[in-house]
Amino acid sequence: MTHILLAIIYVSFISLGLPDALLGSAWPSMYVQFDVPVSYSGIIFFIIAAGTVISSLQSDRLTRWLGTGKVTAISVGLTAAAIFGFSVSHSFWALCLWAVPYGLGAGSVDAALNNYVALHYASRHMSWLHCMWGVGASVGPYVMGYALTGGAGWNMGYRYIALLQIGLTAVLFLTLPLWRTHAGTDAAEEETPAGKALTLMQIVRIPGVKSVMVTFFCYCALEQTTGLWASSYLVLYKGVPSETAAGFASLFFIGITVGRMLGGFLTLKLSDRQMIRLGQGIIAAGLAAFLLPLGEYAAPGGLLLIGLGCAPIYPSVIHSTPEHFGADRSQAIIGVQMASAYAGNCLMPPLFGLIANHIQVSLLPFYLFVILVLMVVMHESLLKISDARAKG
């Protein structure tokens, strides 16, 4: 039965990824229909990310009240309703309203499941579960591309994903008795950490926490900015048709998916810090493919490489938290890390939207490179502090 519960968690991670790439894939068609500037996708993304930050900070309270199973099912259902709302929207402001439950539904389930897996499963499962997120994120742009190519429009692309989400919600609600049946065992609801909970200020004062917060901020800023703006970059700067660009953008998420699948096996040989450094190097190679004159396939190839590089970073940073800070403080620090990650989602893609609107969309690779350099510097700072603590 423990394996069935793990399979349910895998399905839940697929549901997390399904909506994540839709806005970036559909926006080149959407902003024209709504007669708004291209940068306005940043507004929608900001609302979604802000809702995700708020709900993730409440995830511990909700999980203690409802349990991980109910939080997961309710959150996926809320996201499904919001995506369906997108599909029937006829104005930009309607999209903004539906973006509120869109973000609120994503945050609680993401934080709850990541914390649960970090506490109960090995590094390979963390990597493979995030691979399942990549499966969902890869399917999303293909579904949107299919809808656009077939002439059904972006509305139907959102509707197709909403139907998939509704189906996943039904599965999660039908399997709620499994969570309750195993309540009190090591494979069921999250354990309540012993001792008094740390305040935010206490957490931030722990040596190394600021470094890992910035590392997480930069990683998610890079990932989400790429996912949101890659399609627009290809259309507006490279002259790629919208339908083709939607398919090319999915290469980024395919890279993440394949990278996390392979990364699960690599974790048997490589440590978390080695996996993170490997990923950062591959991202740098992908950005170089954008910047160097390597032909028409350089940009799609670069997106694939960036995805492969992103693959091991998020799960490895989460999984290495107990090693850096101790198991007694890892739960609190993981929550702060995820809040930092969502802050990166919230702030950095809209900032590039302003750059694209007022300067040039062609600056995307340079923007991503600056974020990558800061991420590398802060992660190395974390390792230095962690090693000094271990020696002392």
Image (spheres, grey):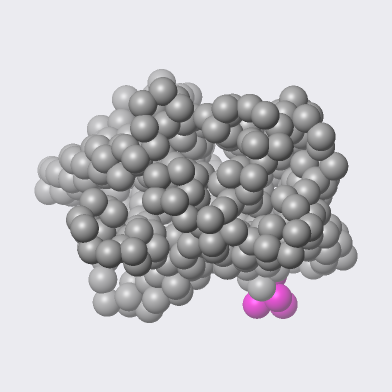
Q: Is residue 84 magenta?
A: no
Question: For the point 32% across and 25% down, which residue is it?
Answer: 205
Tell me if residue 188 comes above or below residue 359 in the rendering: below
Q: Quadrant of residue 375?
A: top left
Residue 390 percent across, percent down from the top left: 18, 49
Q: Quadrant of residue 38?
A: top right
**Quick one: quadrant of the N terminus?**
bottom right
Lateral position of residue 240 relative to residue 35, left or right: left
Question: For the point 32% across and 37% down, which residue is it?
Answer: 363
Q: Is residue 2 magenta?
A: yes
Lateral position of residue 131 relative to residue 63, left or right: left
Q: Bounds of the magenta span?
A: 1-5
Tell me if residue 240 comes above or below residue 103 in the rendering: below
Q: Nearer the viewer, residue 137 or 51?
A: 137
Q: Nearer the viewer, residue 192 or 38?
A: 38
Residue 270 percent across, percent down from the top left: 26, 71
Q: Can see residue 190?
A: no
Question: For the point 49% across and 45% down, which residue is it?
Answer: 232
Q: Can see residue 94?
A: yes
Lateral position of residue 271 relative to residue 82, left or right: left
**Quick one: quadrant of the C terminus?**
top left
Residue 371 percent across, percent down from the top left: 29, 39
